[in-house]
Amino acid sequence: MTRFATLAAGLAIAAGLAGAASAQDIVRGGDPKSAIASVVTVPPGYATIYVSGMTPPVVDKAATGVAMFGDTKTQTLGVLTRIQDALKTQGATMGDVVMMRVLLVGDPAKDGKMDFAGMMEAYKTFFGTAEQPNKPSRVTSQVASLVMPGMLVEIEVQAAKKP
């Protein structure tokens, strides 16, 4: 009987440790003044949500090119709103985003250079705010083009949340 009690106690301790590990929070590290987290650690037990690359909504159906979708800031706001809506369907929020990949096309109005500042203006309305302080790890790259002429922004994210 003592063998059984010892085994049961050992299993209870192991279960408690496993429960403690899965109850850990996501850890975001790096310079607190930075707009992004330089490292994010997701502990075991979290559900992972993958959101495919989202592109901007049309803001002017009568326009063509960039005017159809707006400038980089406008497009980024539209894309991040679409991502927010997609996350809601999975019971998640922008605060659950742990990784982001931003693709920017060079803006013709900026001599073909990506408008990083415009993207950041929109980004900062969703991340690192008083209402939503979490910041994801992120990469931002300039690409030659996206699926439609005039699109300047495509973003994909991964989110993690407790099930």
Image (spheres, grey):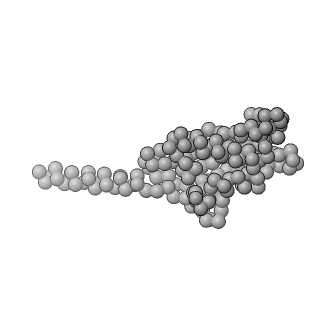
Camera-side residue of 52 and 79: 79
Residue at 68%, 43% in the rendered image: 79
Q: Nearer the viewer, residue 103 or 88?
A: 88
Q: Is residue 8 left or right of residue 130?
A: left
Residue 161 vs residue 117: left or right? Answer: left
| Quadrant of the rendered image containing residue 29 | bottom right
Q: Residue placed at 55% from the left, 55% from the top? A: 40
**Residue 6 position within the rendered picture, expressed as x and y whole percent measured from the top left:** 19, 54
Query: Can residue 66 be seen?
Result: yes
**Could you say which quadrant of the image residue 135 lies in?**
bottom right
Residue at the left extreme of this rendering: 1
Q: Quadrant of the C terminus?
A: top left
Between 12 and 2, the residue placed more toward the observer is 12
Count every numbered label the image shows and give the total: 0
For the point 50% across and 43% down, the residue is 91
Please provide percent x and percent y for residue 62: 82, 34
Q: Taking 28 as reference, is 71 above or below it?
A: above
Q: Position of residue 85 (x, y in %)?
A: 59, 42
Residue 143 visible to the viewer: no
Name the residue at 75% across, 47% down: 74
Location of residue 150 in the rendering, given as x and y in whole percent from the top left corner? 80, 38
Q: Is residue 162 left or right of residue 135?
A: left
Of residues 62 and 11, the one drawn nearer to the viewer in this rendering: 62
